[in-house]
Image (cartoon, coloured by chain):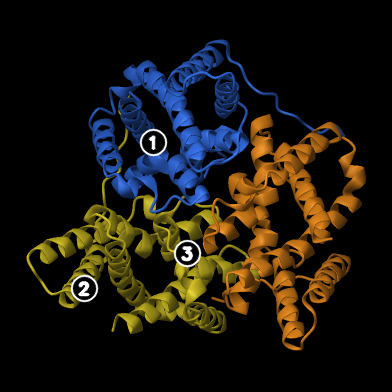
Chain colours: A yellow, B blue, C orange
């Protein structure tokens, strides 16, 4: 189950990378790099920080193949993808839920503290887009005012560890937490939930 | 002693991150990430380059807690921090001195050459701000014309290894070198010392 | 042979870093960091991704010395380097050919799949410039429309593995593939070969 959703996540993140890159007037190589980084950048950063090398996509070529398929798909159907905007958003949201859990699980594997596991889940789910934005020379969307995104991963992670403490079986917990993250993200976009921006009074 | 100063360094760098981020109209999550990166980004890059993983803050949660305290402090007192500008500058300067030595010590632990140790000290002390500036989409302050900063770490590092060669006891050397870095930084700001900018004549 | 060309590559990439940085009004420290990153940034990223730490230049100080010499050379002769533009371009092209092969060899050493080895060759040869551009707050040249660059590394890498499959002796293969990359790069600049930029029709 996780495997299928992981595939969908990489595929959709690659497509979202292509769409961002096209608007930046990059050439076909540049577009591919942005697709790649959007899809596996978060997991790569996580692997580097915990010392899991060679990083994930170097040990499992499926990631590379899925990104290539996502890249070609997005290029060929780029004129129709606007009509698929809702489907893309749904997949991206599913990716957010899945990737958070994958990051948390990797942290647990390495015996790290729950707080660090939650950080790893957030990095896995949302820092691919951050690296994409740095390469495109923009202040990362993730850090700017907008509907909440990475914050949902943090709350999802907290819920995961509370349910875990309460003795919930691991695979059920993963499913429940993923669904929570997905639901909250849908609600956040629907009702335009955002975090405040603070300013300094002079 | 080092431990107390390390705490102060992380705390002050986190505050300086919050102040930078507020001016960039980031949301509360974005501000926290910038605070985090400013406080431990240099040490994290150092750990990755030498292969010390999981990186420091993943193995010692105190860093995370101090950053959270620094973050909340800066948010609550943001309207008064301008009045504390001088104190903040002093703490930042103390951080510069301490972090350089921490970086050098890590390099020695790994049996690296003095030149590499000095590079690691400089990275530890000053590259958190560099990563902060990249995330905020600016040319890093560190690289631009201004009063000398990272260069002081390099000179401090050279002094450390000269005194070490002369047989000075390690903990005294650390203290002396930290004080040198702090003093030179204070003098640099007071007398506006800067490195030249070169240009090309046509 | 590889060693001499490696030295030339680091030297020339350091010079190209200095020339880029001077145009950005950085101070002498900033210029040095850009020279350093341009010269060894690609290899450093490769080492981190495969888990070869401490990274290359920390274990072989020759890289540091060559960069310092390249840095000083570029600073002293900066007003004459425009006249050497053609020689610099030739060296940069040689660097591209050599670095691709060095990256591929490192991947083979770590028992990685040919596709990953080609990625590592491309990263080694071209991502130093990408990190340089991020630090200088520009969309990386590598990703934008222009004469093909990184793409040539990929094609060179594919050729290397085809010739390898056909049983060509390793050192001859390295020489042949480097020469191919260098020739294609020269032809690409001469005839202005570029990859298309895609856009979205509305």
Q: Is residue B24 visible?
A: no
Residue at the image position 82 percent from the left and 57 percent from the top: C5
Q: Which mark is drawn over residue A53? A: 3
- The image shows residue B191 at horizontal and vertical percentages of 57, 10
Residues at marks 2 and 3 touching, judged by CB atoms closer than 8 Å = no
Crowdedness near tag 2: few (<14), some (14–19) or many (≥20) residues, C-alpha within 10 Å: many
Q: Nearer the viewer, mark 1 or mark 3?
A: 3
- The image shows residue C135 at horizontal and vertical percentages of 59, 45
Quarter assignment of residue B201? top right
Left or right of B1 in this view: C60: right
Residue at the image position 50 percent from the left and 65 percent from the top: A37
| Quadrant where the image shows the N terminus of chain B | top left
Mark 1 highlights which residue? B17
Residue at the image position 52 percent from the left and 11 percent from the top: B190
Mark 2 highlights which residue? A174
Q: Nearer the viewer, residue B155 or C71?
A: B155
Quarter assignment of residue C47? bottom right
Residue at the image position 54 percent from the left and 80 percent from the top: A68
Question: The numbered mark 3 sits on a residue in which chain?
Answer: A
Question: The numbered mark 2 sits on a residue in which chain?
Answer: A
- The image shows residue C197 at horizontal and vertical percentages of 66, 71
Q: Label 1's element?
A: helix
Residue at the limit of the structure toward the front, as seen here? B167
Question: The numbered mark 1 sits on a residue in which chain?
Answer: B
């Amino acid at each position: 189950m996780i495997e299928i959703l992981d595939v969908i996540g990489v595929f959709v993140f690659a497509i979202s990378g292509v769409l961002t890159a096209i608007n930046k007037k990059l050439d076909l190589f540049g577009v591919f790099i942005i697709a790649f980084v959007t899809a596996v950048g978060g997991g790569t950063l996580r692997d580097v920080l915990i010392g899991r090398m060679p990083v994930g996509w170097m040990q499992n070529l499926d990631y590379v193949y899925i990104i290539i398929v996502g890249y070609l798909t997005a290029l060929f159907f780029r004129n129709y993808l606007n009509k698929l905007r809702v489907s893309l958003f749904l997949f991206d949201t599913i990716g957010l839920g899945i990737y958070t859990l994958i990051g948390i699980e990797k942290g647990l594997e390495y015996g790290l503290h729950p707080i660090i596991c939650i950080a790893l889940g957030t990095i896995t789910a949302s820092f691919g887009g951050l690296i994409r934005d740095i390469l495109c020379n923009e202040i990362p969307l993730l850090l700017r005012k907008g509907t909440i995104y990475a914050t949902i991963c943090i709350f999802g992670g907290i819920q995961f560890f509370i349910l875990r403490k309460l003795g919930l079986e691991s695979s059920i917990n993963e499913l429940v937490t993923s669904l929570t993250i997905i639901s909250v993200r849908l609600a956040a976009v629907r009702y335009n939930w955002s975090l405040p921006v603070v300013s300094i009074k002079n």
